[in-house]
Amino acid sequence: MKPTISSSRGIMKWGIALTVLGLVAMVGIYLLALAYTPLEVRQGAAQKIFYVHVPAAWSAMVAFTLVGLVSILYLWLRDERLDAFAASSAEVGLVFSVIMLTTGPIWGKPIWGTWWTWDARLTLTLILFLLFVGYMTLRSAVHDPAERARFAAVVGIMGMVLVPFIHLSVYLFRTLHPMPIVLKPSSPSLPPEMLRTLLLGFLAATVLYVGFVVLRYGLARHAMAQLDEEA
Amino acid sequence: MPENAGYMIAAYIVAAVVYLVYGGSLITRALRALRSDRDILGR
């Protein structure tokens, strides 16, 4: 089904509403983190970076996983809407990755005494980020739409394969990175105020991810519809 | 100021700037596209 201007207008309007909602929710998380959660005894205020860093990492991993899953569907169905969604999710995943890869070292400096260490979790995350930078570069370098979508889908699937390794890396390798405290087999190990704020942070980052992707996808569909109308 | 507050403030500012710059740029592009359609299509 070819995209139309009117359907892309509807998608963009939804995207704007969800993005604004996500940004407002993120302001709420900042206020909760600053005013509601207690100060951690050993780390001090640096621990509160966790409410920004972990939800951003969550959304980045969701974004890159969806790129891979949608890319598999694209290779099967060859629907250009799936390719547009994968490209949108990859771009948004990179935005969340930038936050993850900058706030992590800002936490690491006072707690570990170093901005960066080449352990498994950090190195694999950086490789995932660079792989998706390559994904976006590839998309802008190949001009034939079908060829671009096919090549990008293969890279997107390779990126998705890295995600479970990144999650499990703290169990598989010796690493400085803290163990999971929520996404683990046993119950979460956090005081209730911290856990509530973190879970709401996941929710806010998910809404923001959905808003960004819907908006980015709407823009892509709008551009495709305009090209079709001009042709 | 609590211990390590400067690091927390730096991380919060970085995240806020990235979210606002990216979100703002998407919203601006979408509003421009919606406005240009309305001008062309009269809706």
Image: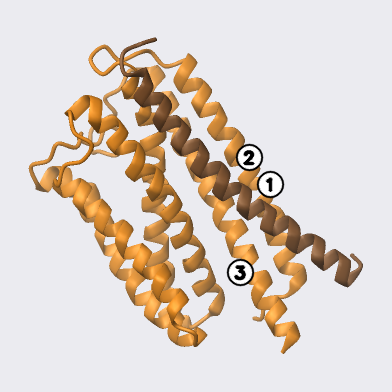
Chain colours: A orange, B brown
Asked if labels 3 and 1 share a chain, the reply is yes
User: As shown in the figure, which amino acid type bears the numbered disc 3?
Assistant: Ala
Alpha-carbon distance for marks 3 and 2?
21 Å
Tell me: residue A132, above or below residue A108. Answer: below
User: Which residue shows up at 66% across the image and 52% down it?
Assistant: B27
Image mark 2: chain: A
Dot 3 or dot 2, earlier in sequence:
2
Tell me: residue B31, above or below residue B42. Answer: above
User: Which residue shows up at 62% across the image and 54% down it?
Assistant: B26
Between A115 and A8, the residue placed more toward the observer is A115
Mark 1 burial class by Cα count in 10 Å: few <14, some 14-19, many 20+: some
Dot 3 or dot 1, earlier in sequence:
1
Quarter occupied by residue A112: top left
User: As shown in the figure, which amino acid type bears the numbered disc 1?
Assistant: Ala
**Numbered mark located on residue A21 in the image:** 2
- Tags 2 and 1 in contact by the CB under 8 Å rule? yes
Mark 2 burial class by Cα count in 10 Å: few <14, some 14-19, many 20+: some
Work out which residue is located at the far right of the displayed protein and give it: B42
Alpha-carbon distance for marks 2 and 1?
6 Å
- Tags 3 and 1 in contact by the CB under 8 Å rule? no
Alpha-carbon distance for marks 3 and 1?
17 Å
Callout 2: SS: helix
- Which callout, 3 or 1, points to the residue nearer the camera? 3
User: As shown in the figure, which amino acid type bears the numbered disc 2?
Assistant: Leu
Image mark 1: chain: A
Between A139 and A39, the residue placed more toward the observer is A139
Tell me: residue A14, above or below residue A31. Answer: below
Q: Is residue A190 left or right of residue B18?
A: left
What residue is disc 3 on?
A220
What residue is disc 1 on?
A17
